[in-house]
Amino acid sequence: MTDHTMPAGEPLLAVNNLQVVYGGAIEALRDVSFEVHPGQIVALLGANGAGKSTVLKAISGILDFEDGKIEKGEIRYAGAQLGRMTAANIVGRGLVHVPEGRRLFASMTVQENLVVGGHHRNRAGLGDSLDYVYNLFPRLLERRAQIAGYLSGGEQQMVAIGRALMSKPRILALDEPGLGLAPLVVNEIFERIRQLSRDEKLTILLVEQNAMKALAIADRAYIMENGRVMLTGSSADLKDNPDVREFYLGIKSGEVQSMRDVKHYKRRKRWLS
């Protein structure tokens, strides 16, 4: 059956049957496959421990730092195999990862953090990228001389995204960009992500626990459980899926359920049977 929600042509990023093991013993991913086409926002959804962040670490070449290893499968980006490339080479090819927790240089200023992200660019390109980031996040222009460690969580997230954008990526991989932020700030961050896709045609791979927020801006989503992809489809289809509505959006028969009811979703997931 043809999936009419998938764009025609070659994907920019294709992950096929990926298996990742930590410490030679703990299987974190099993047979994970998905595609990201140019200009799409693709979301990886699921609870803590589902394997979403491990996917981003695998495609960005940083599994070694946590004793992780790709045991089988392949990762193809822009026609090249990424499995054995270094993280620096992957960034140089235009795939940039914004990790969970932001991980800024806390003792450096906002602008110094941004400049680090564009370290390989010439002076003119660096200036253009700074202007672009400051236009996207005007608050950072006001804070450009402030020490990053003293910023609010939302401002730090803006710096982390801005630092990634300094290198003019082809794919921006975001790990939980709304984690720990106030609802109004989350709305602002997600609106900027939508803007990057809409206005700049930037391809975005979004890891997120907040399914409602992610499905509101994504073109397509993959739902993960226990290191496997269990359900996939367009965001529109998934928002209408009764299991997704009940177990991830907390909605049943048009009403929001209590969190106590939502927490029992594992017992009755029809796509796991």
Image (cartoon, rainbow, N blue to C red):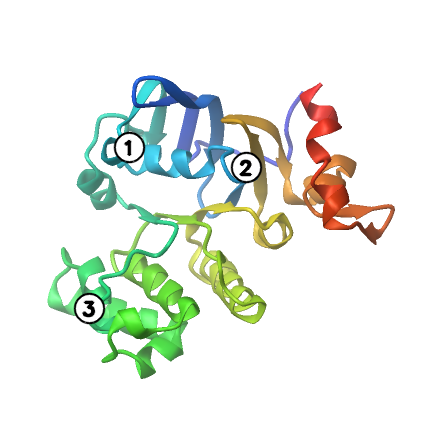
Residue 115 image position (x, y, % from top left): 19, 65
Image disc number at residue 107: 3
Q: Residue at x 52, y 61 (%)?
A: 190
Outermost residue toward the right in this view: 253
Q: Nearer the viewer, mark 1 or mark 3?
A: 3
Whether residue 235 is visible:
yes
Specify the amino acid type for callout 1. Leu
Check whether the beta carbons of the residues at disc 1 and disc 3 lie within 8 A of each other.
Answer: no
Residue 33 image position (x, y, % from top left): 48, 25
Q: Earlier in the sequence, mark 1 or mark 2?
A: 2
Q: Residues within 10 Å of mark 3 (few under 14, many from 20)?
A: few
Cα separation, mark 1 vs mark 2, equals: 30 Å
Whether residue 269 is visible:
no
Q: Is residue 99 above or below residue 70?
A: below
Specify the amino acid type for callout 2. Pro
Judging depth in this view, the residue of 163 and 262 nearest the camera is 262
Q: Residue at x 42, y 59 (%)?
A: 200
Cα separation, mark 1 vs mark 3, equals: 26 Å
Q: Which residue is under mark 2?
A: 7
Specify the amino acid type for callout 3. Ser
Q: Residues within 10 Å of mark 1 (few under 14, many from 20)?
A: many
Judging depth in this view, the residue of 36 and 207 nearest the camera is 207
Q: Earlier in the sequence, mark 1 or mark 3?
A: 1
Q: Quadrant of the N terminus?
A: top right
Q: Earlier in the sequence, mark 3 or mark 2?
A: 2
Q: Which residue is under mark 1?
A: 63
Which element is circle 1 on?
helix
Which element is circle 3 on?
loop
